[in-house]
Amino acid sequence: MTSPPARDPNSSLAIAVLGLGEAGSLIARDLLAAGATVHGYDPKAATGEVTVPDGVAAADSEAAAVTGAALVLSVNSAKAAVQAFAAALPALRPGAIWADLNTASPGTKQQLAAIGEQHGIPVTDIAMMAPVPGRGLKVPMLASGAAAGTVAAQLTRLGANVEVLDGQAGLAATRKLLRSVFYKGMAASIVEALDAARAAGLEEWLREHIGEELAKADAATVDRIVAGTRQHAVRRGAEMAAAADMLTELGVSPLMADASRARHERIAAGE
């Protein structure tokens, strides 16, 4: 695989996409369809684990992919976010903007911003707030940090849906991960409960019950949940201990049930 040729950033917006997995490839395709020039890199492309979308100019390294790019979208992984930036830095042209779309911690986003500031490269923190499949570039995004407004304007012209937050890099990630604690925690609890219900022969009943509870939830539900949890933490902690025992008896690991027990016990203790 050879390095991409030099590009004229004035011919069309030149964008590099680092990470061509499910999310990165869908975003790259939409950028191409909107008229952007897209170069991409994914280390798994060399092994055939990842297919480079048609029309994306494949590069053999981060540095090769970002050469001449006005905007870089890092969509690889939280673990690779800092390494990818370090590998690309020597090839970034003056005026280039780095946008990190990985689901990384606010601390990692701030680390990227600090590195960028040292090298004169503004870093924008972008949080994708819904699954990318079925939405592509139109997935709702939050952006914060240096050049967030510029990145949002550039991507919006290409069809993206970006809300700019007034704050440093890490603010967008904070909002996404706070939502994840709630939503992904609820999802994991539902999966665990249905696994146990299946083992008890009651999956259909519980699935219908969960659907009914979700359907009638509203804004006031949050207040009732928080107030009730604090008021009845001791009793509910004991209830979840019994639930964890039941799951064990059914052959289901009570990971979420036991975590719920521990959280209720800490609330009861005043933490």
Image (cartoon, helix red, strand yellow):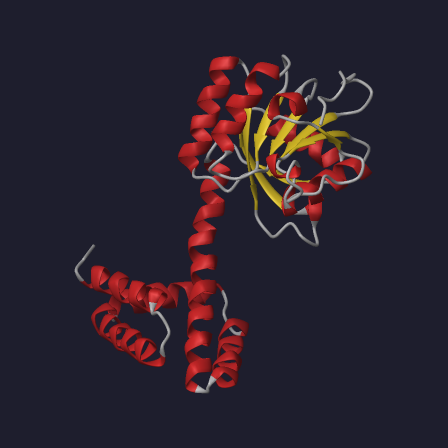
Which percent across, then down, holds residue 54?
A: 80, 39
Q: Quadrant of the C terminus?
A: bottom left
Horizontal side of 31 relative to 175 (left or right) equals right
As drawn, 234 above or below 173? below
Can residue 167 be seen? no
Which percent across, then down, holds residue 135?
A: 70, 51
Which percent across, then down, holds residue 42?
A: 63, 35
As drawn, 267 above or below 122? below
Horizontal side of 15 relative to 215 (left or right) equals right
Q: Residue at x 26, y 77 (%)?
A: 242
Q: Which picture quadrant has residue 163? A: top right
Q: Quadrant of the N terminus?
A: top right
As drawn, 209 above or below 105? below
Horizontal side of 118 relative to 54 (left or right) equals left
Direction front: furthest residue: 47
Which percent across, then down, holds residue 238?
A: 22, 74
Direction left: furthest residue: 269
